[in-house]
Amino acid sequence: MTNDSVVVDDKVDVREELDLSTAQWRRLPGPDPDSADGPDIVEYAFVTHSDAVTYVALRQGSGTDGTVLVFTPSEWDAFLLGTRAGEFDRPA
């Protein structure tokens, strides 16, 4: 069986053009107050692109040189709705 699906990165140009050097990274408070500065904390920032769209950037809080995920406003809204609906909860 072969996998004929093709992965398309539809935001490759946007990601390369976003100015993350001026992003104001935020952290969500974790369940453990002592973990607020740990390496597993996720940081997010709202970054406006030259196309006037504000994207959401997500990164691991342990470093600024790692992978940054970029979400369009509609992708971010869908993610938040799914989270609130429990779509990403661990099975009981």
Image (cartoon, grey):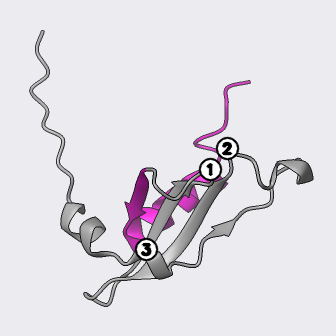
Is disc 2 surrounded by few (<14), some (14 to 19) or many (20+) residues within 10 Å?
few
Q: CA distance from mark 1 to mark 2?
A: 7 Å
Instruction: Say above or below: 15 vs 5.
Output: below
Residue projecting furthest to the right: 33
Q: Quadrant of the C terminus?
A: top right
As shown in the figure, which amino acid type bears the numbered disc 3? Leu
Taking the image as shown, residue 14 lies to the left or right of residue 37, namely left
For mark 2, what is the residue? Answer: 40
Instruction: Say above or below: 68 vs 53.
Output: above
Sequence-wise, the earlier of marks 3 and 1 is 3
Is disc 1 surrounded by few (<14), some (14 to 19) or many (20+) residues within 10 Å?
some
The x, y position of residue 42, in whole percent, is: 63, 54
Closer to us: mark 1 or mark 2? 1
Residue projecting furthest to the top: 1
For mark 1, what is the residue? Answer: 62
Q: Which residue occupies the foreground of this view, 41 or 10? A: 41
Q: Which residues are magenta?
A: 67-92
Taking the image as shown, residue 51 lies to the left or right of residue 32, namely left
Q: Secondary structure at mark 1?
A: loop
As shown in the figure, which amino acid type bears the numbered disc 1? Ser
Question: Was residue 83 drawn as part of the magenta stretch in this picture?
Answer: yes
The x, y position of residue 14, in whole percent, is: 25, 71
Q: Quadrant of the N terminus?
A: top left
As shown in the figure, which amino acid type bears the numbered disc 2? Asp
For mark 3, what is the residue? Answer: 20
Q: CA distance from mark 3 to mark 1?
A: 16 Å
The x, y position of residue 67, in whole percent, is: 42, 50
Taking the image as shown, residue 56 lies to the left or right of residue 40, namely left
Q: Are marks 1 and 2 in contact (CB under 8 Å)?
A: yes
